[in-house]
Image (tube, rainbow, N blue to C red):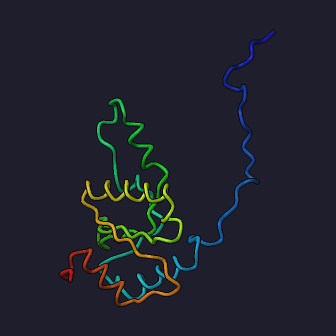
């Protein structure tokens, strides 16, 4: 009698038919409207907007081999930011933009937002929170972004 291989026990069979492609990258039309304003009206030839960027692509955790690394990494591992403004020439991250809808008023979401704001502040990456709106004032958004990027003085 041959001994059972312990590695095959409880193995999940992957069913590729369970996967599907999302039809759109954005969850809400307001996110796409905001992106179009960034792309067409604001960023020009110096900057580019990335969408749904994983926080772990923007922020690393030091001292990988020390106790607590996994706990620190897990705090950022599955989180994403709505938009990231980068310098077009080298894609260096310059500004995080979060569209704050009704879910941002919930306690858990507020806690998440506060934590990420603190992390981004600690690494020197500014965050701009923009309330979700049925339509956006292009000039107002352009001024907010320019101010956050340090291109104009804040009023």
**Residue 140: image location, x then y, percent:** 35, 87
Q: Is residue 78 left or right of residue 46?
A: right
Between 2 and 32, the residue placed more toward the observer is 32
Q: Looking at the figure, which quarter contains the C terminus?
A: bottom left
The residue sitting at 70% across, 60% down in the picture is 20
Q: Is residue 13 left or right of residue 134?
A: right
**Residue 114: image location, x then y, percent:** 37, 57
Q: How many marks?
A: 0
Q: Residue furthest left?
A: 153
**Residue 139: image location, x then y, percent:** 35, 90
Location of residue 22 by image quarter: bottom right
Q: Residue furthest right?
A: 1
Location of residue 93 by image quarter: bottom left
Location of residue 29 by image quarter: bottom right
Q: Residue furthest top?
A: 1
**Residue 13: image location, x then y, percent:** 74, 39
Image height of 73 relative to 81, above or below: above
The residue sitting at 40% across, 43% down in the picture is 73
Image height of 34 relative to 75, above or below: below
The residue sitting at 49% across, 51% down in the picture is 78
Between 13 and 113, the residue placed more toward the observer is 113
Q: Looking at the figure, which quarter contains the N terminus?
A: top right
The residue sitting at 48% across, 65% down in the picture is 104
């Amino acid at each position: 009698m041959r001994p059972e291989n312990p590695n095959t026990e409880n193995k999940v069979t992957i069913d590729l038919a369970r996967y599907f492609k999302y039809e759109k990258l954005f969850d809400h039309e307001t996110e796409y409207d905001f992106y179009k304003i960034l792309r067409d009206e604001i960023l020009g030839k110096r900057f580019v907007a990335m969408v749904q960027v994983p926080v772990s692509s923007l922020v690393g955790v030091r001292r990988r081999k020390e106790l607590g690394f996994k706990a620190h990494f897990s705090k950022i591992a599955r989180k994403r930011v709505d938009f990231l403004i980068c310098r077009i020439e080298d894609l260096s991250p310059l500004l995080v933009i979060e569209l704050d809808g009704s879910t941002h008023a919930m306690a858990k979401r507020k806690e998440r937002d506060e934590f990420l704001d603190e992390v981004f502040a600690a690494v020197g990456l500014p965050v701009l929170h923009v309330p979700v709106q049925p339509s956006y004032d292009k000039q107002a958004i352009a001024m907010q972004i320019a101010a956050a990027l340090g291109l104009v003085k804040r009023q």
